[in-house]
Amino acid sequence: MADVVLNTGDTAWVLASTALVLLMTPGLALFYGGMVRAKSVLNMMLMSMITIGIVSVLWVIYGFKLAFGYKDNSQWYGEFSLSGLGSAVNELTNNGGVYPIPLLAFAAFQLMFAIITPALISGAIADRTKFTAWAVFVTFWSTLVYFPVAHWVFAFGNKVGDTVTGAGFLAARGVEDFAGGTAVHINAGAAGLALAIVLGRRIGWRKESMRPHSMPLVLVGAGLLWFGWFGFNAGSALGANGVAALALLNTQVAAAAAALGWLLVEKIRDGHPTSLGVASGVVAGLVAITPACAFVAPWAAVLIGLFAGIFCALAVGLKYLFNFDDSLDVVGVHLIGGLWGCLSIGFFGSSSINSLGLDGLFYGGGATLLGKQAFGAFFVLTYSFIATLIIGFIIDKTIGFRVKAEAEIAGIDYDQHAETGYELTSSSRGGFSS
């Protein structure tokens, strides 16, 4: 440890990546905000923005240590401590080995992942959620679900010499997830499904038109997500190096291929490609490549993205088959895309691409890695779904999770926030029927 010194270039890249990932949450607010009806746009965007405030505070009080602490040497959680991060000012990052970046830079970077994960869930329950209940949910879900799962997946332990203590459950088993396919996307997708069940279907679902009210907002939001995702994936290398470059290139080509795959499905199925399709395809590709971006070759990233676009475009119809109202397709994009991305490492992973990874099925590694990936993906899915059901039902039976029917019909923005997204008349209260 003594021979590792601060590297300003690596530190600068991690700090820049931190800012890029933070931008993703406002980008998500625009993306989701454009997809809902005009009378719900502010509430939808604020559900993303409030997570920045809540999770940031929780993270510095106890969240970071619960996710990345190692004092208790537990595979299931980090360290129960309210001591915060003040003593970490002069420490370097030690996560399975010492990195030449400040621990506070690593903590800030991981905070952005903790912020956007619950924000992703909000898309599944658009148009019908009490804002206060959502804030309570974010608090408990982050504490009981995200922080422990982040420990399982991202905590590689404190390494001193040849001894490692406090590695997470899935990380210790060799589950490969470079930037959050399990901890972020499968976690959020499973939680979104659970909350959609708890809150029930929107009034008029499948009977009334609930089309996006602003496709320009959706496209701007998708663009900001794409831009920020370079920090999300390439920043996870924790240095300005070849692994970061590989992750960045794979992120780009997978998103591009997924957009083409989604549009292909739309053209064959519906007869025309759409702007919502290209935006959704981009996000699906970004989701799928997230766990695999540093473990596969660029040609494999193209295939992962292409199939992600196809799979997710087809999967968004599952809500009609099973009759659950996942408002903005969190399940179809994040759960299905995350599952495919994690499993794809078992096919396309190559130790020649990254010596820290194993060879997948197509590189002569057999089914060993695929089995590890499947175990990790479905373990997180199951835990998140069950835990979210419990948290959601408790909130619903105590303070109530859903707004009253008349508020949902007239407009949740005015009911929950006493304002509307668009002042088109002298009085906009209840003025939107879209």
Image: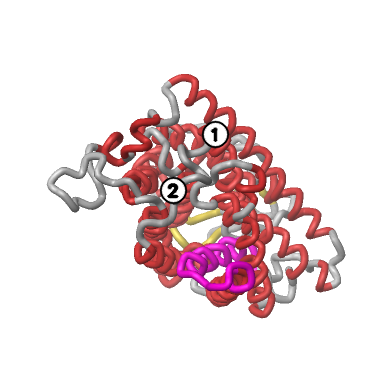
Locate residue 88, reporting x and y percent: 42, 47
Most extreme residue toward the front, as rendered? 207
Identify residue for label 2. Answer: 115
Most extreme residue toward the left, as rendered? 426
Amino acid at the residue labelled 2: Ile
Quadrant placement of the N terminus = bottom right
Tell me what residue is drawn at x 62 percent, y 59 percent.
337
- Does residue 425 appear to the left or right of 74 in the view shown? left
Q: On residue 144, which mark appears?
A: 1
Highlighted magenta segment, given as a residue range: 266-294
Magenta includes 274?
Answer: yes
Tell me what residue is drawn at x 55 percent, y 47 percent.
188
- Does residue 15 appear to the left or right of 149 in the view shown? left
Locate residue 285, reporting x and y percent: 58, 67
Q: Name which quarter of the figure residue 85 lies in.
A: top left
Most extreme residue toward the bottom, as rendered? 299
Tell me what residue is drawn at x 46 percent, y 44 percent.
122
